Amino acid sequence: MTLPITGVYCAAATPVLADLSPNLPAFAAHCRWLIAEGCDGVALLGTTGEANSFSSAERKMILEAALTAGLQPGQLMPGTGVANIPETVDLTRHALAQGVTRVVMLPPFYYKGVSDEGLFAAYSRVIEGVADSRLQVVLYHIPQMSGIAISHDLIERLRAAFPQTVVGIKDSAGKLDNMAAMIARFPGFSVLAGADPLLLPLMKIGGAGSITATSNLVARDLALVYRAANDPAQAGAVDVAQARIDAYRNLSNSYVQLPAIKGMIRYQTGDAGWSHMRPPLVALSDAERNDLRTKLLAIGATVTGN
Amino acid sequence: MTLPITGVYCAAATPVLADLSPNLPAFAAHCRWLIAEGCDGVALLGTTGEANSFSSAERKMILEAALTAGLQPGQLMPGTGVANIPETVDLTRHALAQGVTRVVMLPPFYYKGVSDEGLFAAYSRVIEGVADSRLQVVLYHIPQMSGIAISHDLIERLRAAFPQTVVGIKDSAGKLDNMAAMIARFPGFSVLAGADPLLLPLMKIGGAGSITATSNLVARDLALVYRAANDPAQAGAVDVAQARIDAYRNLSNSYVQLPAIKGMIRYQTGDAGWSHMRPPLVALSDAERNDLRTKLLAIGATVTGN
């Protein structure tokens, strides 16, 4: 069965200036580079993009900057889910007004222990509030951060109510079993891996692709894994690419992940400003950053700047 | 040592209409009633108030409705902390522009596992962004909901940096030991109980008061406990009041707490509209509501309506 959303999407990091305002030119350049490297699209304003550390006004500016940079609306998949419904509706309608019809949507994430009935009501109110038949929603399962799991029963209920709208899920919980179960239970539903090491096994069982943080660094390798996962003739090249993906991923996870991703982009671009983080996240310390630089060289990365 | 903020504050519930928009007249009436019952103030737009289920625009309307209802700015202590800093600054400045100088402030709550350094940076940026010497901040420790604990080291650092501004904490984690340790370590810092059963023991060890959900129902009893906690001559009256507080509290916690609080206000006011909840929270089922009604009668409540 054809899947509605497929490919390698980058959970793009968002550069900020020293005053922590979005660095829109640097973001535009990064988006163009990601597409040039082989990403099918940019899933901006997700967890890696520090989206929930930006105001609604800033989020809109960031999305518009990607379009101004020349990306096509169909290449963009912004996160639009915040803790309250009216602003989730507003951000989603803003995306649609720009022609961007696909969004990744967190459940409301302040209250914990809420029922599937409550989450169904929340997603339903957002979709009905947006009231645009073009909308395609990718649910966002990242319970370790949001505190809210997306259950399979909730997916079934949402698909039944909004079959043209609720078309996929980003699963960032890191368990292949959960993704396999969704693929089996929901034909035609796009299951996207949120963790880089799982793209390859996911593609072997009918997954749709990935939305991952390491693609800020190794999009070309992820694109190769995505396209060649099931081609025995390319197994060697796939293994090499996957090994490089895993090396970057393991390196980022040996620090706090998001500052490490931005630290790696700093050395990739030579722009020291990429290190800045929005609180409550903080940049790597100088010692960590120097250590990261040394380890990047050790895994064969081209490093620019100190 | 004199404490900067003292008394019994109600973590006020926020009534909504059938379309889930704020019911401002009902909220105004509820605020006036809470003061008449003996609350020193209303801590609106907290967890019980479903604050994070409202947009910034709605939150501002709700605060303004309380002022229009005749409450004094000094009687109001709104929650202004959202996941991002710019909107936290904006909500806090809005409060100050109305003359409301005391706020309860959640830490940024999307990212989990963040460092004290990051939380210090976040609170610092908010306080510096607000840039108003009148501001008094009550930190909000409710890790079971926000996923973010306020450590004692963070409090110490914030008090050192902003001694006139960071003046207290609402501790909703329900552990008296943690409150006792803060009272001992931080002279002149207002430690407010977020759980009703702890007001009495807290007042015996130098606590500042309470911000609790059950005060939507039994503010008069809480006010008595607050004022007479250390008066042996009133020990009997205090015990009666505390028993009633505990009965309401236990009843609300035998369902999902927030819908149960609203269900009890429904029967207190006779206004069935009080049952409505903003998703992801949902109202009690009809069966639960009827059960609640029966149990309210059993604990001696005056019940209006079916």
Image: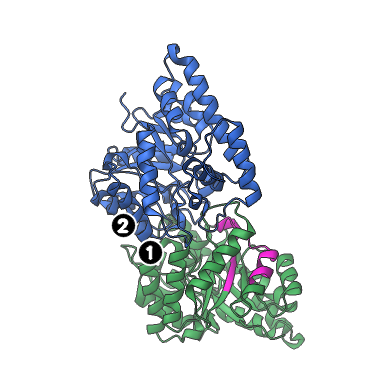
Chain colours: A green, B blue
Characterize the local packing of mark 2: few (<14), some (14-19) or many (20 or more) Cα atoms within 10 angstroms: some
Chain under disc 2: B
Q: Are marks 2 and 1 on the same chain?
A: no
Give percent across and percent down for residue A172.
Answer: 61, 65
Q: Which mark is residue A55?
A: 1
Residue B126 visible here: yes
The residues tagged by marks 2 and 1 sit, at their Cα atoms, a distance apart of 10 Å
Give percent across and percent down for residue B117.
Answer: 42, 48
Describe the element under mark 1 as helix, strand or loop: loop
Q: Nearer the viewer, residue A276 or B189?
A: B189
Q: Looking at the image, is B230 positioned above or below residue B154?
A: above
Residue B156 visible here: no
Q: Residue, x 57% and y 46% (percent of image)?
A: B306
Q: Is residue A225 magenta?
A: no
Extent of the magenta region:
A138-158
Q: What is the quadrant of residue A210 in the picture?
A: bottom right
Give percent across and percent down for residue B75.
Answer: 31, 39
Q: Amino acid at mark 1?
A: Ser
Q: Which residue is mark 2?
A: B90
Characterize the local packing of mark 1: few (<14), some (14-19) or many (20 or more) Cα atoms within 10 angstroms: some
Chain under disc 1: A
Q: Is residue A140 magenta?
A: yes
Q: Residue, x 59% and y 59% (percent of image)?
A: A118
